[in-house]
Amino acid sequence: MSGTPQEIFQRYVYAGSITRNADALAENFTADGVLEMPLLPAGATFPRRLVGREEIRGAMAEYYAQQPKDARPPNFEKTGYVLHATADPDVFIAEIDTVFDGEEDGDGVGEDVVVSLVQIFRIRDGKIARLRDYFAPELMG
């Protein structure tokens, strides 16, 4: 499997954020791929570093299973991203603003919630060899 940074990013987002399919997500990584969340504190409920496709598959399946069934999905019409090329053709950066619609309360619908993050992708043979995901740690349960 090969692809442009755009295609690789879209496959990753579809497998993870849209369908929450741990098998499909893991298949986006090389067999020895690494998924890191460097800003997570030590001892967080979610692992800070996952090494290998099978560890990524298992940890993400467990994480997806713990998510509430009625959790608000991102509003993909409002969500935006920009992909940045780097001097290294095997590295690209995704700058993402994920938007969740405001919750309804007694006064109507509240303000949208915007979650901004940066992901750094290192690609090998069309798959993710290393992904560093930088986001606010309090977003992970």
Image: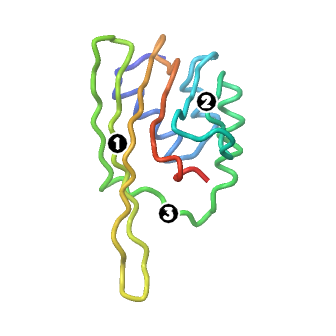
Identify the mark nearer the N-term, 2 or 1: 2
Label 1 vs label 3: CA separation?
Answer: 18 Å
Q: List x then y, in percent, for residue 2.
A: 43, 16
Determine the CA span between mark 3 and mark 2: 23 Å
Q: Amino acid at mark 1?
A: Ile
Other-residue count near label 2 (Cα within 10 Å), few / some / many at <14 / 14–19 / ≥20: many
Q: Residue 110 at x, y = what percent?
A: 36, 75
How crowded pointer 1 is (Cα within 10 Å; few <14, some 14-19, many 20+) is rated as: some
Residue at left 42%, top 79%? 104
Q: Is residue 124 left or right of residue 6?
A: right
**Measuring 54% from the left and 35% from the top, which residue is drawn there?**
37
Viewer-nearest residue: 108 or 18:
108
Report if the CB atoms under discs 2 and 1 are less than 8 Å apart. Answer: no
Badge 1 is on which residue?
Answer: 96
Q: Indicate whether 83 appears above or below 60.
A: above
Tell me the amino acid under the disc marked 3.
Arg
Q: Is residue 132 left or right of residue 24?
A: left
Q: Which mark is residue 26?
A: 2
Secondary structure type for disc 3: loop
In terms of secondary structure, where does tag 1 sit? Answer: strand
For mark 3, does the 10 Å Cα neighbourhood hold few (<14), some (14 to 19), or many (20 or more) residues? few
**Relative horizontal placement of residue 131, taking residue 10 as reference (left or right):** right
Q: Secondary structure at mark 2?
A: helix
Q: Tell me which label, 3 or 2, sits earlier in the chain.
A: 2
| Coloration of the structure image | rainbow
Residue extending farthest bottom: 106
Residue 3 x %, y %: 39, 19
Residue that label 3 marks: 72
The quarter of the picture where residue 48 lies is top right
Mark 2 belongs to which amino acid? Ala
